[in-house]
Amino acid sequence: MTDTLLLAFIFLCAGVIAVPIASRLGLGSVLGYLIAGIVISPILSLLDVDIVSIQHFAEFGVVMMLFLVGLELEPKVLWQMRARLSGLGGGQVVLTTIAVTAISMGLGLNWKFSLAIGLVLALSSTAIVLQTLNEKGLMKSDGGQASFSVLLFQDIAVIPMLALLPLLAMPDLVDSVGHGIQSAEIHGEAGHHDTHASENNHGKDDHHDDHTSLSLVEGLNGWQTALVTIGAVAAIIIGGNFLTRPLFRFVSGARLRELFTATALMIVIGIAVLMMLVGLSPALGTFLAGVVLANSEYRHELESDIEPFKGLLLGIFFITVGAGINFTLLSENFLPILGLTLGLIALKATIIMILAYVFKIRGGQKWLFALGLAQAGEFGFVLLSFVVSNNILPPSIADQLMLVVALSMLLTPALFIVYDKLIAPRFAQSQAKEQDNIETSSPIIIAGRGRVGGIVDRMLQAAGYNSTVIDYNSGHLDILRTFGIKHAYFGDATRPDLLHAAGIEEAKLLIVNIDNKDQINQLVEYAVSNYPKLHVIARAVDRDHVYELYSLGCRDIIRETYDSSLRIGRSALEALGHSRETAEELKDHFNKWNGESMLEIAQVYDINVPSYENQELIDKIHEIQRTKIPKLKEEMASIKTKNSTHQK
């Protein structure tokens, strides 16, 4: 018990210290976790901690991540992605496998070893890439969506890989320390490398495998296995559609949040276990369950309950990746392993860039796509343990490949930084030809036509006003043009030259509906400072963002959830017995008071000073809490009393 608490304390301390520092330096949380793992690696070695076992447990964070991703995708959206899933995903896996296999054979390895290595290194890191894309607000971009398509296909591809790899087994390959390998079968010095790491990493995996051999398909022939597998998938789909709602309704009757959380975890864990019992990927199963539940009224509650566990487990997983690096083996073979790692990144980036051109991923998005998926992935650890235990690869080769996988994952956050700081800005300066030519200008410019901008655009069109729409998601624009919407153009609305092409000098109105908060601020600041006569309407993501936009000079700010919140409040008052007129008056009075209070705070807000250091801001908030909130309550009570007397 003491050892477990001490280990948990070490992991938490490492994450709590390293991640905020990395985030402040612009490195991202993933790199912070990886560095934390490297720092605490000597401590874990002294405590004789089994990093591999912890990593197996923490990999469940990937399962939860794909469940949450599935909750965001309706089945029809997934169906629309089918071309990219098969084309981009299938193309990447096949081409990378062929290329790595060919290079390995060129280095003198036999074809079985080479093919196994090709399959292992074809996979990318779902955990790191999705986490980083979400953190940077790039998940909905063209490159982000393409990356997700490839990662999802890779997770599916693990299943046939696990079926294919045992066919490459070599009976005379001893899986413990690599002795007995025929020199004719392995070229070079692979058989002479230190196998100490192999004993540490793989021996425990074998022990683990011995105790998790329970299977529903063991001993079945081909068609029986297929029936059981189809039955398991059907059970997830049917259960998700027909059984989860009554279950959640029953559990919610207890009015205990922790019980709902336990139920959500039970479903995710149960599906993962079922998938493993039939030999399928647990991540694939939970993703499918998430898609089935995407239209459920319990979706948002599931997201809020699962999200903390997902984040915590992924953090632990990233720490174990850093801590699991075999520095002894790395120091002995530093240049070869570094060369293999950089070569793998360059090879995968080149292949993905070619696919980006074929599938018309334009602009800087193709660089985001290529650099984001250039690493090996966490499933590589699983497959390497699998190929060693099944006499497919010798531990001496697998240990070096473990380092290549870990180092490539370690370098991935740095690749995103290179994209953010170097490639994206330079590409933005020279990509004018990549943008759509805006042939007509309009007095109204709409930046972003997503779920908010689309409604605004349709409303203005219905009222007889033409607008120029700029959006950076080419796939979304292709769909719009399919339905005859011709006034939407591809491009980055934060770029001054594109705004000039859209006619911002003569425009009367700029409506900013971009999803990314930083890009909203950038566009608003540019438009307000350079075109003072232009009326700017900006979408704010939350209350603090309202203050930021006000300090940047914008005076027409719409908080994206505010109006719906007022309507909910009005409905709540009606449900409490007030008439529609009273509820409407109470809502309007609160809205007027809230607007006045926010204006007072906004006038003393400084975007360049942290709120906790702005004494004038703190004093103003305290003044509102001390004097104006009690007055608001009195006025609201007076309205209720007046209307109640009038009704009588």
Image (cartoon, grey):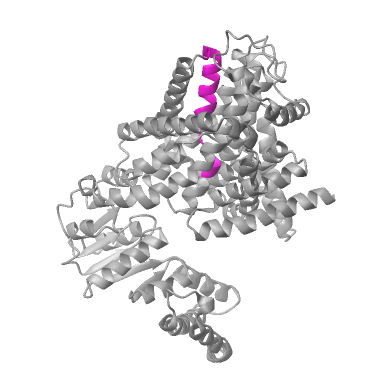
Residue pictured at 44% horizontal, 44% vertical: 415
Seen from this angle, which residue lies furthest right?
Answer: 1
Indicate the position of residue 151 as horizontal and vertical percent values: 49, 36
From the viewer's perspective, is residue 363 above or below residue 159?
below
Residue pictured at 34% horizontal, 59% vertical: 453
Q: Quadrant of residue 161?
A: top right
Indicate the position of residue 203 as horizontal and vertical percent values: 74, 27
* Left or right: 178 as drawn, with respect to 127: right
Q: Is residue 247 visible?
A: no
Q: Is residue 350 visible?
A: yes
In the rendered structure, which segment of residues is drawn in magenta? 109-128
Indicate the position of residue 380 as horizontal and vertical percent values: 58, 31
Indicate the position of residue 255 as horizontal and vertical percent values: 72, 61
Residue pictured at 69% horizontal, 36% vertical: 52
Give yes or no for residue 121 being in the magenta stretch.
yes
Give yes or no for residue 79 being in the magenta stretch.
no
Q: Which secondary structure dominates the residues rendered in magenta?
A: helix
